Amino acid sequence: MSPLDRGELDRLRVDIESDRVERKRSASNLRNIRRTVCALANDLPGHGLPGVVLIGVEDDGGCSDAEIDDHLLTKLAAIKDDGNILPIPSLVVQKHTLSECEVAAIIVEPSRSPPVRYRGRTWVRVGPTVRLATPEEELRLSERRRAGQRPFDRRAAAESSLEELDLGYFESQYLPQAVAKEVLDDNRRTLEQQLRSLRLSVDGLPTWGALLGFGKDPQGWIPGGYVQFLRIDGVQVTDPIRSQKVLTGRLEDVLCQIDEILELNIRVRTEVATASREVRSPDYPLAALQQLARNAVMHRSYEGTHAPIQLYWYADRIEIRNPGGLFGQVTPEKFGDGTVDYRNPLVAEIMHHLGFVQRFGLGVPLARKELRRNGNPAPRFDFQPTHVSVTVRPAR
């Protein structure tokens, strides 16, 4: 994140000509703030410098005397990971006192992968105005996208072609979820331009993430991109196998099969509480297992390995192991506290649009909450350079 010191923030506060700053009297309208974050992340003028939303400032730069407390700062920081703005913006939220004016500053870095969209719409800042991008402006943003160090899922699959994608599925199932209806209704772009705009193609070739999400044969291109399920009749991996299955297909197919497998294997104990009421107690809460499995699909390494995700269901526990250690700013100490980084940002985006992720960074905290509520012990995580695994025990 490019630094903005207090002097630069104070200069932007009073510079009414700058298109890098938006002033807000309060944070009462989060929708408008999200639009502005989206617009600053798109950086249509091409400054290559961070923009800022200042909360607690009048249009002329004066103080509005808004209350800047921890609750507000937390609410503003949640804008980054709530799934409304994609790809996920790079931003920090800070509290400052500028010329005796107490403000909250949302500092937004220009995106490396524009266009950025808020709820399927691309917003840009032109002078002091935030508005929807025109098709020509979206094309400019797409062309500006940096081709440097893209994550693996956003790189072109050099030996493939767009014919490897199920474009009918993309158009009918994914596109309406990823782009707002009125934008689609007014769309004049070719299918290839739509794929490029959504980071699914580079130079006429599908990205690896596109092959995972929409490929006719995803595992033909990414052999390890599947889930291996074993139900083991015992507590050792060498004990007899009761059932096994290989979960393959597109991302949506794999995720739906995971849900089916989990539902089939959870054992529910029914007790009669009263003459008219039964209490159903599962040995594992479905929501917790879904979150942990989806977390493995989203954050695993797909590059340089043919290893699958392993979902092993023992008589006394469930183990989920995914290839690849922790990534980026996520450390063992920060794991599960809401700190997020993305080895596969495009996979995360596809999962969100398909409805498997509601809010980023909450998968592990939600799993812990559901396990605790159901009476299960806390999950145990093991972090190794080559893999991450989690062990879940049944309810007591």
Image (spheres, grey):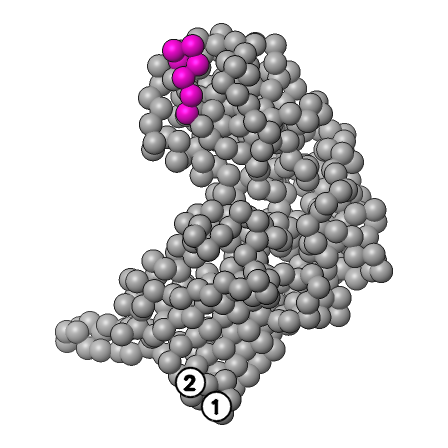
Tell me: residue 116, above or below residue 301. Answer: above
**Which mark, by number, is residue 235?**
2
Q: Residues within 10 Å of mark 2 (few under 14, many from 20)?
A: some
Q: Are marks 2 and 1 in contact (CB under 8 Å)?
A: yes
Do we see residue 276 in this rendering?
yes
Which quarter of the rendering shows the C terminus? Answer: bottom left
Per the picture, the main secondary structure of the magenta-coloured stretch is strand
Q: Which residues are magenta?
A: 95-101
Taking the image as shown, residue 282 lies to the left or right of residue 140, namely left
Taking the image as shown, residue 293 lies to the left or right of residue 345, namely left
Q: Residues within 10 Å of mark 1 (few under 14, many from 20)?
A: few
* Residue at position x 50%, y 33% in the image: 92
Between 190 and 375, which is closer to the camera in this rendering? Answer: 375
The residue identified by callout 1 is 239
Q: CA distance from mark 2 to mark 1?
A: 7 Å
* Residue at position x 85%, y 60% in the image: 159
